[in-house]
Image (spheres, rainbow, N blue to C red):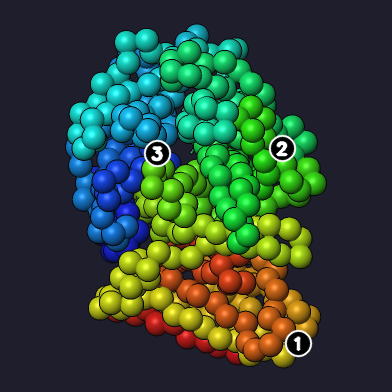
């Protein structure tokens, strides 16, 4: 049963548990993907950093586990960064329980240029806990304008920003989050912070934040903010009540971008699961898959600047070259009139996964449907995503199917929906449109 559910073009570990992508970095033409990993079980146990690499974002080679728990705790999520001197550092949260409470501190690891040896800094933790139960997932970057290192890190329901000259001595600058975007009971997790240019060459800053529950499609999800960052504080360009979703689907979490010193357009990747059921999905040798990597750009919309995402050419080409009937991508064109609907079924004709209705001249509503699976109580559900219907021509959907991992894009990449399914054997897969 288990290998039937292993995707071909989405990364999954050979064995063991996987959640968040960590320390994404491109060095010397090689993409490195670290990840939250328990190599010894398919449950979220003592976290290690697993490690894989790729030159084309399609074929991943799994490498030995990079970080093992030590006396400071297990290794929660974090980041990798390369300085102008070529030095590569990893930052992660050491997590342990003290008196029945989580205790989380930030640690520094030195890596060699090939990312094969890892040395924990003797000064760890480089940033001790300031009295917060949730203090984790450091994202570290060099802020050129203020000539300093910056760390964005979970501060409960906000993101804290710290600065440093030497990556060891960190000073609190500010926090962002209260009253902005979407909150729920849990913390804001796995921040990412990076600059991106608009089409006129002006710099903007993106802050990505995960919420473990209460997201768009219920459970975990990933929001982002567009704004300005001066090395000290983040200022939201949108009204505080505006929530922007990097993905509307149920299975896209803890997203991070690859650090790339060459300054290429950011490429983002998320964990394709949801804490509502991540621990009970029906695989045996491994549990957890990543989303596809997607290139980010900024698009001017009527509401303001928004992130659009597209597949890197190598990933799109790999779908097109696939001979596996369960792995393909299709561009579907729907010339619907107002009030008309079309069902899209991916795994046999009996059960559509999407029902697309033209709800107004300029609007389509995509109903996402996943049937109930008794073994995974929170799995079955449906929810709607509203998309603009183009002024001229049909609605275009780009559907990527990789066994049971489905990523649907529309609105020129402004809307993505990532969903897991546990479908019948690949031989029965066939995309059909049903009125
Ligand atoms: C997000 C998260 C992080 C944490 C990690 C632990 O999915 O909860 O906040 O570092 O998972 O595995």
- The image quadrant that residue 201 belongs to is bottom right
Spatial separation of the CA atoms under disc 3 and disc 1: 44 Å
Mark 1 or mark 2, whichever is nearer to me = 2
Q: Which residue is mark 3?
A: 22
Q: Is residue 244 above or below residue 160?
A: below
Residue 235's label in the rendered image is 2
Q: Residue at x 68, y 63 (%)?
A: 300
Of mark 2 and mark 3, the one earlier in the sequence is 3
Dot placed on the residue nearer the N-terminal end, 3 or 1: 3
Residue 307 in view of the camera: no
Mark 1 neighbour class, 10 Å CA radius: few under 14, some 14 to 19, many 20 or more: some
How many callouts does the rendering have?
Answer: 3
Q: Secondary structure at mark 1?
A: loop
Q: Disc 3 beta carbon < 8 A from ligand 1?
A: no
Which mark lies nearer to you, 2 or 3? 2
* Nearer-the-camera pick, 330 or 30: 30
Q: Residue at x 60, y 12 (%)?
A: 131
Residue under label 1: 338
As measured in the structure, the alpha-carbon distance from the residue carrying label 1 to the one carrying label 2 is 40 Å
Q: Position of residue 257 (x, y in %)?
A: 46, 46
Q: Residues within 10 Å of mark 2 (few under 14, many from 20)?
A: some
């Amino acid at each position: 049963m288990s290998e039937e559910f292993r995707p071909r073009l989405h990364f999954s570990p050979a064995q063991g548990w996987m959640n968040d992508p960590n320390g994404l970095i491109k060095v010397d033409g090689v993409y490195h993907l670290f990840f939250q990993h328990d190599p010894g079980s398919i449950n979220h146990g003592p976290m290690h950093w697993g490690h894989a690499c790729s030159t084309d974002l399609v074929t991943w080679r799994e490498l030995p586990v990079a970080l093992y728990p030590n006396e400071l705790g297990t290794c929660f999520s974090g980041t990798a960064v390369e300085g102008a001197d070529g030095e590569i550092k990893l930052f992660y949260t050491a997590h342990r329980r003290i008196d029945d409470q989580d205790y989380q501190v930030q640690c520094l690891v030195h890596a060699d240029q090939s990312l094969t040896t890892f040395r924990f800094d003797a000064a760890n933790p480089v940033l001790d806990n300031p009295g917060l139960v949730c203090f984790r997932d450091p994202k570290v970057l060099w802020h050129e304008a203020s000539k300093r290192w910056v760390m964005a890190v979970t501060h409960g329901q906000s993101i804290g920003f710290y600065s440093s000259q030497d990556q060891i001595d960190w000073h609190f600058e500010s926090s962002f989050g209260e009253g902005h975007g979407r909150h729920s009971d849990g913390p804001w997790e796995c921040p990412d912070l990076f600059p991106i240019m608009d089409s006129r060459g002006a710099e903007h800053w993106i802050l990505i934040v995960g919420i473990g529950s209460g997201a768009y499609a219920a459970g975990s999800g990933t929001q982002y903010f567009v704004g300005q960052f001066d090395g000290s504080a983040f200022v939201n360009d949108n009204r505080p009540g505006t929530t922007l979703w990097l993905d509307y689907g149920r299975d896209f979490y803890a997203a991070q971008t690859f650090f790339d010193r060459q300054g290429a357009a950011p490429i983002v990747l998320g964990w394709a699961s949801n804490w509502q059921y991540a621990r009970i999905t029906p695989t045996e040798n491994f549990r957890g898959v990543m989303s596809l990597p997607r290139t980010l750009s900024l698009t001017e919309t009527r509401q303001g600047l928004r992130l659009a995402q597209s597949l890197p050419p190598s990933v799109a080409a790999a779908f097109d070259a696939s001979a596996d009937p369960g792995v393909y991508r299709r561009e579907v064109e729907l010339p619907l009139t107002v009030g008309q609907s079309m069902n899209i079924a991916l795994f046999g004709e009996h059960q559509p996964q999407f029902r697309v209705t033209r709800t107004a001249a300029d609007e389509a509503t995509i109903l996402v449907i996943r049937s109930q699976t008794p073994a995974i109580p929170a799995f079955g559900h449906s929810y709607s995503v509203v998309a603009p219907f183009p002024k001229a021509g049909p609605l275009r959907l780009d559907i990527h199917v990789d066994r049971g991992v489905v990523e649907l894009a529309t609105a020129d990449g402004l809307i993505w929906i990532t969903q897991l399914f546990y479908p019948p054997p690949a031989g029965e897969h066939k995309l059909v449109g049903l009125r």
